[in-house]
Amino acid sequence: MGPVDVVQGQLDAYNAQDMHAFMQFYAPNAVLANLNGDILAEGADAIRARYAKVFADFPQNHARLVNRVAVGATVIDHEDVTRAPGGERFEVAAIYTFRNGLIARVDFAK
């Protein structure tokens, strides 16, 4: 599975709120961070806890892919995220980097 397939798989699992499938795409020591800023979660347990809260707080959460760019082992997704129909909405660029075929880091630009 190449980087684009991995990113698409985790996006599909995110939209299905399937935590087990979602976490299979992440390296055990993966990092989530704001681009050029704070670390949001480090390691599988912290990532799992972060998204368990998102899925619980926003059961209708959905990320729509606007555009994807893949360059080597880096994939950048532009997503339009809706927390609930008629609810909070925002755009994000997620920059995925890989190690051993898994997502090692995601940097978010909002």
Image (cartoon, rainbow, N blue to C red):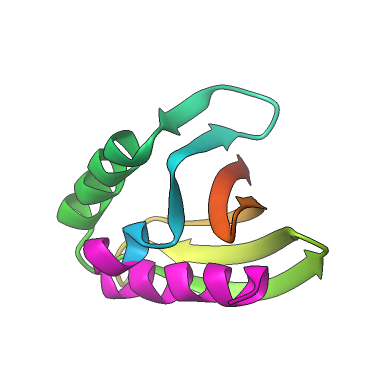
Q: Residue at x 71, y 62 (%)?
A: 75
The span picked out in magenta is 1-21
Q: Is residue 9 left or right of residue 65?
A: left
Image coords of residue 97 (percent x, y): 66, 50
Residue 110 seen from this side = no
Image coords of residue 22 (percent x, y): 35, 63
Image coords of residue 78 (percent x, y): 66, 63
Check the image and report above or below for 81 versus 92. below
Q: Is residue 49 magenta?
A: no
Q: Nearer the viewer, residue 60 or 6?
A: 6
Dividing the picture into quadrants, the one containing residue 89 is: bottom left
Q: Residue at x 62, y 41 (%)?
A: 107
Q: Is residue 12 magenta?
A: yes
Give the dominant element type of the magenta stretch: helix, strand or loop: helix
- Residue at the front extreme, as displayed: 100
Dividing the picture into quadrants, the one containing residue 38 is: top right
- Residue at the right extreme, as displayed: 71
Q: Is residue 21 left or right of residue 71?
A: left
Q: Nearer the viewer, residue 17 or 2?
A: 2
